[in-house]
Image (cartoon, rainbow, N blue to C red):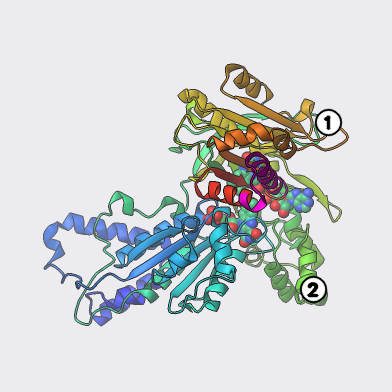
Amino acid sequence: MAPPPAALAAAPFAEDQLALIERLLRDASPEQVQWLSGYLAGFQAAAGPRAAGPALPAAPAAPRPPLTILYATESGNAEALAGTARKAAQRLGFAVKLRDMADTTPAEVVKTGPLLVIASTWGEGDPPQRAEAFYAGLLGADAPAFAGVRFAVLALGDRAYANFCETGRRIDARLAELGAERVAPLAECDLDYAAPARAWTETVLATLAPEPDAGAAVIRVDFARTPAADEVPDAEALGPRVAEAEITERVLLSSSRSTAETWHVELALDGTGLTYEPGEAIGIAPRNDPALVDAVLAATGLTDDAPTRAALTTRYDITTLTAAQVAAHAARTGDAALAGLAADPARVAAFLRDRQVIDLLEAAPTRLNPAELTGLLRPLPPRLYSVASAPEAVDGAAHLLVAAVRWQSHGRGRSGVASVDLADRRSAGDRLSVHVKPNPHFRLPEDPDRPIVMIGPGTGVAPFRGFLQRREAAGARGRNWLFFGARQFTHDFLYQLEWQDWLASGVLTRMDVAFSRDQPDKIYVQQRMWEARAELWRWLDDGAVIYVCGDAKAMARDVHASLLAVIAAGSGRDADGAAAWLRAAQQDGRYKRDVY
Ligand SMILES: Cc1cc2nc3c(=O)[nH]c(=O)nc-3n(C[C@H](O)[C@H](O)[C@H](O)COP(=O)(O)OP(=O)(O)OC[C@H]3O[C@@H](n4cnc5c(N)ncnc54)[C@H](O)[C@@H]3O)c2cc1C
Ligand SMILES: Cc1cc2nc3c(=O)[nH]c(=O)nc-3n(C[C@H](O)[C@H](O)[C@H](O)COP(=O)(O)O)c2cc1C
C-alpha cells in the first residue's frame, strides 16, 4: 500500500527515516497498516504524555480546503465508502460535504469545489433509483458547466453484468465533457471493492491535498489519538462483520407439486453479535457445487489437487464468466478460435450469454497449475437474502426465504450457487458464514401510525413478513396493505396461514393476491393494483409509504408503470404529473424499492 506522498512530505522526520517509513508502508497489506496504527496508539498511551515530546507546531490557520464527496447507492456500499472517505479527508484537513445524489442537483454540486464521486450501477447499467434525477440532469442537455472543478470517480459494479460499472463510467465521461478536470483515472471495482476503494481514496485525497507549508511540520493523520466513536472507519467499508450462524430449521414452503422451489431457512444468531432491522438482508457465504468443482479440476488437469479443490469449493467464483476471462484464457492457451472470439465484442457477448467458466475451460482445454487456475477466477461473492423476520418476534433469529435457482443451457444443467447450496446440500445443524447487510433505505417508517403498501410477489414478500412482525410486536396502529403474487394458490402461497392470521387479527388491513397460473390468462400484482386503484390512491394520498421488493427485471418495472396509472387515474394528473408525483414520493422516502 503506497503512503500518500502529500502526507509523508509533511511528516516531521529526516529523509532516511522517511525512506524507511515509505518502504515499510509500500509493501504493507491493509491489515498490517491497521495493526501498525493500533500498535502506535498503544505505544504512545503506554509511554504516557511525556513521550509525545514537545508540542508539534499547530496547523497553519489557513482555511480548510473544501471537498464534496457525492455518492449514488442502492444497497449502501457506495454510501459506506463515501463515509469512510469523508473521515479520511477530514483527517487530512479538508472541509468535507457529504452528499447523497438523491438529495442534490448538478447545479448545487458544481458550486462546491473538488468532487469525489462514488457511484454504483444497478438494473441493466442503470444508476441507483434514488439517484435517477441527478443522473438524468447530469447527462441531460441542461447540465451546468463544470469548468474548473477537479474530480475523480470510483465506480462500483459487478463483472457478472454486461454493463459493468456503467453509471460510474458515464458520470466520469460526462464530468470531463462538461469541462471538469479529472485528477485520477476512473477506478472500476468489482464486488471485492474494499481494497481498491481504499487505495483510490488514499491516492485521490493525497492528490487533492493542499501543498504543505514549507517549514510547518504538520501531522494531519494522527495515528496516536484514539478516534472518537463516530470517526472509526465504517465496518462496511473495512468488510462486514462475519459470523458463523447455525441453521436451525429448513422447510420447503412451496408444495412438492409446485414448478418453483422456495425454502424457509431459520438461522440462530445468538452468540454471533449480529443484529438486524426488518428490511435488511443477510449475506451468506455459499459453497460451490462439488460436481462442478470436480468438472473444473478435471478440465484443467488438477483432479488430485486437494488444496485447490478446497479453495474452489469456498473461495472462488467458478460460475460467472466474463469477457476478461475469455481473453485471458485465449492468450494462455493460444487457441486460435478462442482468440478470434475474444477479439470480437459482439461474439464475446453472445458466447458469455448463459455460459459459465466450465464452458470456457472445455472450449479450449489445457492443463493449468493451481495459481493459473485461481488467477483466472474472481473471489466467490456472498449472496444476499432479505430477512423475513423481525428479531423481537423470533428470539433474535433471522428467517430467510430462498428460491432455488435451476436452469438448463447449452446442454448442461445449471444451478444457482447459494440457493441450491441451501436447498440441496445444507440441513438443520449446519453452520453458515453470514453477515448483515444494512439497508437504511428500506425501513419501516418511524411513525407507527403511517399506512404502508407492500408489493412483494415471490420471494419479494420476505421483508414484509418482517415488517408485520415488527408492527404487531410494537402494537403499531398504521394500516398495512399487502400485494402478493405467485404461480399457483395451492402450491406457492408462501406463509399463507400467517397472512390469514394477521388479516383476522387486523394487523394486516388488506391483502390482494395474484396467482399467475391459476387461469388461462396470467394475472400479476400490477393488475390487482389497477383493479384496486381508487382505494389504493386514497392510501397514497393519505401519505402511505409504498414498498416494492422482488424481481428487478420485469416486476419492478411493471409495478412502477401500474403505480403511475393508479396515480393518474386517482388524482386526475396527466402522465407527466403522475411521474412527478412518484418522483417526489421517491425523493421524500415514500416510494422504496429493494429489487434484485
Ligand atoms: C438485496 C437483495 C435481497 C435479496 N433477497 C432475496 C430473497 O429474499 N430470496 C431470494 O431467493 N433471493 C434473494 N436475492 C437474490 C439472491 O441474492 C441471489 O441472487 C439468488 O438466490 C441467486 O443466487 P445463486 O447463488 O443461487 O445463483 P447464482 O449462482 O448467482 O446464479 C444466478 C445467475 O444465474 C443466471 N441465471 C439464473 N437463471 C437463469 C436462467 N433461467 N437462464 C440463464 N441464466 C440464468 C443469471 O445470470 C443469474 O444472475 C436478493 C438479492 C439482493 C441483492
Ligand atoms: C439487481 C442488481 C443489478 C445490478 N446491476 C449491475 C450492472 O448492471 N452493472 C454493474 O456493474 N453492477 C451491477 N450490480 C452490482 C452492484 O453495482 C454492486 O453490488 C455494488 O457494489 C452495489 O453498490 P451500492 O450498494 O452502493 O448500490 C447489480 C447488482 C444487483 C443486485
Q: Quadrant of the N terminus?
A: bottom left
Instruction: Verify whether residue 355 appears in magenta.
Output: no
When asked about the image quadrant of residue 284, the answer is: top right
Residue drawn at (53%, 41%) of the image: 280
- In the image as oriented, which residue stretches furthest toward the front? 572
Q: Is residue 464 something that shows in the picture?
A: yes
Residue highlighted by disc 2: 341
On screen, residue 12 above or below 192:
below
Where in the figure is residue 52, as x and y percent of width and height?
A: 15, 63
Mark toward the viewer: 1 or 2: 1
Residue 39 or residue 230, whichever sits in front:
230
Residue 427 or residue 454, whichever sits in front:
454
Image marks 1 and 2: residues in contact by CB distance under 8 Å: no
Instruction: Tell me which label, 1 or 2, sits earlier in the chain.
Output: 2
Where in the figure is residue 182, as x and y percent of width and height?
A: 48, 77
Question: In the rendered structure, which segment of residues is drawn in magenta?
Answer: 554-577
Where in the figure is residue 417, as x and y percent of width and height?
A: 68, 47
Instruction: Verify whether residue 573 appears in magenta.
Output: yes
Q: Amino acid at mark 1?
A: Asp
In the drawing, what numbered circle is on residue 518?
1
